[in-house]
Amino acid sequence: MTTEVNDKIFHDTIADGVTLVDFWAPWCGPCRMQAPAIEAISEEFEDRLKVAKLNVDDNQKTAQEFGVMSIPTLIIFKDGEEVDKVIGLHSEEQLTELVEKHIQ
């Protein structure tokens, strides 16, 4: 299950464990195309991975903090630290491979 996050709760959300954050916007076509793969990853790794979505239009402070200039941008955090970042549309297989590098 994905969780909607905002500037206020972002850092609490990523503070512990492994978290995949999808930086997106409702008007972004590739972001909407990315959503089903994000949901599938969320279900596949539900015991070992938190998945969050941050609307960059509504939460510009956090997007700027992590240098998000293009969307979709997916960032993996481990215990609050950024450990990986990919930009653009990715397949479910690519995302699975990315996530598996960071979870045990």
Image (cartoon, rainbow, N blue to C red):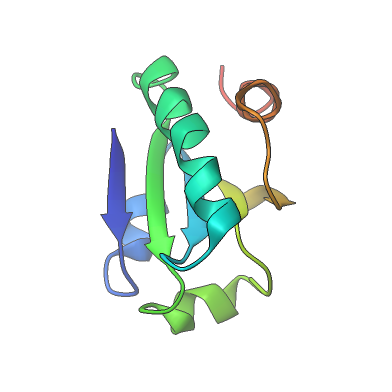
Q: How many marks?
A: 0
Say whether residue 9 is left or right of residue 69.
Answer: left
User: Does residue 78 appear in this view?
Assistant: no
Q: Name the residue at 39% across, 53% down.
A: 53
Q: Quadrant of residue 97?
A: top right
Work out whether 56 lies above or below 37.
Answer: below
Say whether residue 56 is left or right of residue 92.
Answer: left
Q: Quadrant of the C terminus?
A: top right
Residue 58: x and y in percent read 35, 79
Between 72 and 10, the one nearer to me in the picture? 72
Say whether residue 84 is left or right of residue 56.
Answer: right
Q: Name the residue at 54% across, 44% down.
A: 33
Residue 30: x and y in percent read 60, 53
Residue 80: x and y in percent read 49, 53
Q: Name the residue at 38% across, 36% down.
A: 50
Between 56 and 16, the one nearer to me in the picture? 56
Q: Quadrant of residue 59?
A: bottom left
Work out whether 62 lies above or below 101.
Answer: below
User: Does residue 47 appear in this view?
Assistant: yes
Q: Name the residue at 72% across, 49% down.
A: 86
Work out whether 39 lies above or below 47.
Answer: below
Between 21 and 26, the one nearer to me in the picture? 26
Q: Quadrant of the N terminus?
A: top left
